[in-house]
Amino acid sequence: MKRILIMGMFMALFASLGHAQPDKRTLPGGIDVIGKGQVIVKPDTFIFTITISERSETANQAKQVVDKKSDELLSLADKLYIADKDIESSQLRIRPIFATDQTRAAAVSDKPGASPQQKPALIEVSRNITFTLLNFNHYDQLLEKGIQIGVSSVSRLRYEVSRADFFYQQALEAAIDDGKMKAQRMAKQANISLGGVIYLKESENFAPRRVYGMTADAPNYQSVPAEQQISAQVQLIFEIN
């Protein structure tokens, strides 16, 4: 009885292990290689944001300064023939800057539970202007103007390769050629005759996508955009004759 019980336990264990193993697709036999390809391209779109802010006793005073600086910056953009669709100007943001009223605080400090009264000492008005540039030479010109008029901050420059899919196809072709050369060298070394491709798969990790990068913090005069690498990878299996 014990022997039957032990055998039953072993059978159940082996059965569970068998079900736990994942089903693997059986690949055809032959020379199995990985082909890799890459294309080096220069970015063609450049995006950054300039923040203009001012603090004053009234919102109207601060707004006038922000509007004046914004107009100067946008006037330069117009002279550079930057299209309106490539300029995004946010709505004004208004934020009160609080400070403790010392006089009021002294008057109520002797009262139990009293606390200093707070009131806005200044009003901060700010606006973000985002530029999408197709000519990289305009980047330094806008930065220089921003520094001259006293903008509050400039974001990091984000650069993109808009035709990433086109360049990815080139990298994919290079990856297939690379796989073919590897298979030919292996067949020659093994002294066998190489047949045609019987299996070809694109690597999902190298799917085409919009490529972008980012520079260091601005301002950065005479900036140079970094080149981008677009890569592709494939798996090929060749028949052996």
Image (cartoon, rainbow, N blue to C red):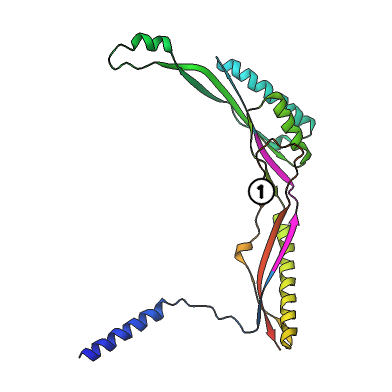
Question: What is the total number of numbered labels drawn onto the structure image?
Answer: 1
Q: Quadrant of the C terminus?
A: bottom right
Name the residue type under label 1.
Gly
Using the image, determine if residue 31 lies above or below residue 159. Answer: below
Question: Taking 56 as reference, is 115 left or right?
Answer: left
Using the image, determine if residue 190 lies above or below residue 151. Answer: below
> Along the line of sight, which residue is nearer the eye, 10 or 201?
10
Q: Does the magenta stretch include residue 165?
A: no
> Along the line of sight, which residue is nearer the eye, 122 or 86?
122
The residues colored magenta run 36-49
Furthest-left residue in this view: 1
Q: Quadrant of the N terminus?
A: bottom left
Of helix, strand and loop, which one carries label 1? strand
Place residue 92 in its image quadrant.
Answer: top right
Which residue position holds label 1? 213
Q: Position of residue 167 (x, y in %)?
A: 73, 58
Which SS type dominates the magenta stretch? strand
Using the image, determine if residue 22 lies above or below residue 73. Answer: below
Q: Position of residue 177 (x, y in %)?
A: 75, 71
Q: Position of residue 143 (x, y in %)?
A: 72, 33
Place residue 186 in its image quadrant.
Answer: bottom right
Q: Does the magenta stretch include residue 44?
A: yes
Q: Can residue 82 be seen in this view?
A: no
Q: Which residue is drawn at 75% across and 84% down?
A: 188
Using the image, determine if residue 203 lies above or below residue 47. Answer: below
Q: Which residue is drawn at 70% across and 60% down?
A: 168
Q: Where is residue 26 in the image (x, y as percent from the top left)?
A: 55, 81
Place residue 25 in its image quadrant.
Answer: bottom right
